[in-house]
Image (cartoon, rainbow, N blue to C red):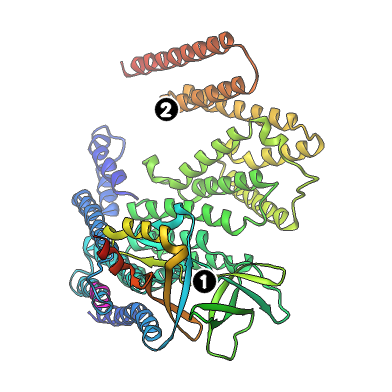
Amino acid sequence: MRNTKLTLGLFMIVAVLQLAAPLYMAWHWENILQTGSQYYWQTAPVDPYDALKGRYIDLGFKEQKGPLVGNFNLEHGQIAYALLAKDANGHTMITGVSATQPSETSYIRVKVSYTKDNIVHVELPFRRYYIQEDLAFAAEQAYRQRANKEGIVAVRIKDGYGVIEQLYIGDQSIYEYLHGKK
Amino acid sequence: MDNKAVEWLYQQLPELVDKGIIPAQSAERLQAYYGPVDKQLKSKSVLMIFSIIGTILVGLGIILILAHNWNQLTNVTRLLISVGLLLVAQILAAATIWVKKDHSTWTEGGATFLMLMVGTSMTLVGQTYHIVDDTSAFLLTWMLLSLPLIYLMGVTTPAILYLLGVTVWTATNHFGIVDKQLTWVLLALAMPYYWRLLKRNRYGNSAVIFTLVLTICFYICFGIVFSNYIHTLASLICATLVSVTFLVGLLWFDGAVDTGRRPLQAVGLAGSISIAYILTFKWQWSRLNWQAYPPGSGEYLLALTLLVLVIGLGAMLLRKKRYNNVLLGILPLVVGFGYILQYFDASGINATILLNAYVLWLSVTILLTGVRQSKIGLLNIGMVMLAFLVVARFLDIDFSFVVRGLTFVVLGICFLIANLLMLRRKNEVIK
């Protein structure tokens, strides 16, 4: 019996750790969603075969590169920091890519794809938009047709982490757009 | 000793006593030593298999239902569902620890369900916030959070899932060469449990399945972790690896009555024969280019270490005076010699001849052993190996269809005659 109590005691510790994992994840992303700065990112179409993977849309972005900041060698897959600003239309632009964490607030952690002529091409951390299974096909069609002209992703960013708030087609959210079409 | 063997022994005992081969006292002593046969074991195993399959199906079903990505659910509801599912699974697992700790059917099912729900809860949160799941980080967290369950609940299914998870983690992780070595630490974390299984009964269901999965996972991890080193000497390294498996099986896992309970020997044997057979093709040797792709020191070190291990294990086997499997065990040495031949003759013809001679020798030896011991299974394995060798050479070299056809017919007739003769001989012995 003492042995069982000890096992159960240790199990409780493990159980708390197991519960902490999803709770921490939820807190981390919800906090960014609530308190992060809002950025609007223009989308770009992706390879039609990649567009829909089961229940999410693979997103492509127009602004995925910026000039190298500092004297560093950035390699493929390396974590770097993209400095962000907004253009006249309120769309996000990358003003530079740095290997070290910047002191200012508007930046996002990215993965380096490649560097060419001092311009760093990066992979943004939010590339998926999960969508309800039965709406997925229509969403894919809408995205493919209009991503280049009217696709916008609203992202909340804080301390280098970003979380997607909404995917817009024109001035409607993807769900409003799909329901309007029905 | 496994249950089946004890059962067989007990069936034999009355006859042995009747015929005066052993005294009744010895029979009683044997029975006292091995104890009663667990008649319920079979139904228990069936129950456990169904419980595990049922649990996995329920778990996967829940994952699929949530994968629908219900739009109606708010972020809070989704979080409540994911945490709630995890909590329910934890309460079930805790209850099995408290009430049914010695019922493996319950503990296996409870722990497996909990392990699946740990992964599900994290996936659901990731999906809610459109997170690009960094698969390797997710898998690592999932496996490490599930690992303690293996020890706390003494469960094999989560241990096997852990091995599979670590293998997938190794395959999806894009870190450098040094970071990849973490795979060994992760696999080692499951070893105390494996040791416990081996100590309990190395020929029991759990230990046999664990050994099989571990061996295959180990091969995959080995290939991925050392992928930067393994190039030119790949065939030699593979041959030594399967040989080590085979020899370890012969040395420490040879006591099972049932051949199906010797996973290391089965994997080692299948691997050795396959590699030897693949290396009988000339293109396998002629494609090697020592000048363009010279093996690095890492590759040499890896091959040499494994070769030393094979020689050491082989010596241990010979010391035990077990010469019958030496022929298969020397595969790495033959392949190694093939490499030396290929180094001096880039066309690869000498190495090809060597490997063909080796497989021919091996097939004939197995075939003759089958004939000598009147084992029809062994005879057929030898014949199949021989037939494969002949067929492969016919595909290699440009012969006319008539000649190929005739050879196939002759081979088929040889098969039929050999089996017929063997059956007749067996029948005569029975009469």
Q: Quadrant of the N terminus of chain A?
A: bottom left
Dominant secondary structure of the magenta stretch?
helix
Which residue occupies the foreground of this view, B42 or A65?
A65
What whole-number distance in Å separates the C-alpha atoms at marks 1 and 2?
59 Å
Image side of residue B38 versus residue A53, left or right: left
Residue B416 highlighted magenta (yes or no): no
Asked whether the viewer can see residue B156, the reply is no
Q: Quadrant of the C terminus of chain A?
A: bottom left
In the image, residue B372 above or below residue A151: above
In the image, residue B271 above or below residue A106: above
Q: Position of residue A116 (x, y in %)?
A: 69, 67
Q: Position of residue A109 (x, y in %)?
A: 54, 78
What residue would you read off at disc 1?
A124
Q: Amino acid at mark 1?
A: Leu
Are callouts 1 and 2 both on one chain? no
Q: Which residues are magenta?
A: B79-85
